[in-house]
């Protein structure tokens, strides 16, 4: 028979069976090999279709500006193609820019806590993003804080009194808080800035009920004279803004011209906000 061409007529029955068996095994091995090649080819086709679907989904999210979902899809792929790797880099940059712009808008509206929350949520997607980490640090650093909470004077003289947690004193008939009062007789208050802040703003004026004396407030930064301000006893408080970039210490020095503290006036510092 043509199906048993390997069998010779001179073979014994046993030899013939063995030969037929070997032929069958060779055919089966060849078939298995072909089937394996077919499976590999099919898997490659399936993987290609799957990758195409991933890229289409990612591109759809990208077009809508939904970079977070696009990144989620890409990060869910274990073996990324070169095209996916390029998409990942591109969309990561767009997502960082989107978050930083949104945080900046909130910051511009004075919504510092909301800006930090936006960045924190984004960091759950990109925990190692230097751009987002840096932006968060800047937002936190620029958030207005109560001076008395973070930089309360550590060295004072002559009747220093602090006013926090709703405690008030009066200037020009109004209750004021978040600051301190000191006498005007060659008095000073020193505060440690630790080089962390950019600006200090506050109102300063004559405290109601104190001696009606004009005084001078002089500001020193790191021991160097910065500026002086005339505080009139019969005038409204003045608003002061002091740049602090890189400064480590601030000194408030008051002088009302009196030779003894007993007859000195009192100056008040209120709404002290540091950024």
Image (cartoon, grey):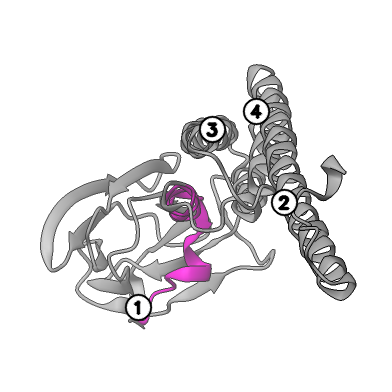
Classed neighbour count for the residue bearing mark 4: other residues with Cα under 10 Å, few (<14), some (14–19), many (≥20): some
Q: Is residue 109 magenta?
A: no
Rendered image: mark on residue 91 = 3
Q: Secondary structure at mark 1?
A: helix
- Does residue 192 appear left or right of residue 45 in this picture? left
- Kindly identify which numbered label has been placed on residue 19: none
Give how far apart the Cα atoms at labels 2 and 1 are: 112 Å
Task: Estimate the x, y position of residue 12 in percent, counting from the top left.
Answer: 84, 72
Which residue sits at x=77%, y=52%? 27
The first of marks 1 and 3 along the sequence is 3
The residue singled out by tag 2 in the image is 30
Asked if residue 41 is positioned above or below residue 253 in the image, the reply reads above
Point out residue 257 in the picture as x, y percentages from the top left corner.
Answer: 20, 63
Picture residue at 49% right of the left edge, 75% below the top: 161
For mark 4, what is the residue?
55
Task: Residue at 64% x, 41% y: name it.
Answer: 74
């Amino acid at each position: 028979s043509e199906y048993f061409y390997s069998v010779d007529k001179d073979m014994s029955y046993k030899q013939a069976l063995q030969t037929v068996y070997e032929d069958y095994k060779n055919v089966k091995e060849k078939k298995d090999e072909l089937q394996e090649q077919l499976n590999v080819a099919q898997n490659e086709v399936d993987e290609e279709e799957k990758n195409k679907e991933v890229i289409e989904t990612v591109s759809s999210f990208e077009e809508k500006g939904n970079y977070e979902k696009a990144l989620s899809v890409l990060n869910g792929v274990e073996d990324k193609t070169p095209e996916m790797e390029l998409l990942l880099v591109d969309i990561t940059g767009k997502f960082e820019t989107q978050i930083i712009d949104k945080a900046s808008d909130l910051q511009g509206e004075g919504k510092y806590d909301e800006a930090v929350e936006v960045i924190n949520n984004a960091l759950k997607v990109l925990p190692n993003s230097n751009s987002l980490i840096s932006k968060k640090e800047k937002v936190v650093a620029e958030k207005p804080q109560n001076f008395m909470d973070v930089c309360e004077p550590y060295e004072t003289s002559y009747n220093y009194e602090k006013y926090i947690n709703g405690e008030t004193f009066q200037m020009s008939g109004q209750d004021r808080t978040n600051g301190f009062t000191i006498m005007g007789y060659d008095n000073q208050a020193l505060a440690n800035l630790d080089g962390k802040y950019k600006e200090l703003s506050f109102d300063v004026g004559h405290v109601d009920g104190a001696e009606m004396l004009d005084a001078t407030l002089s500001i020193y930064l790191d021991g160097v004279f910065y500026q002086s301000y005339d505080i009139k006893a019969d005038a409204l408080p003045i608003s002061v803004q002091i740049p602090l970039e890189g400064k480590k210490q601030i000194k408030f020095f008051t002088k009302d011209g009196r030779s003894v503290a007993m007859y000195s006036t009192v100056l008040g510092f209120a709404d002290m906000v540091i950024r």
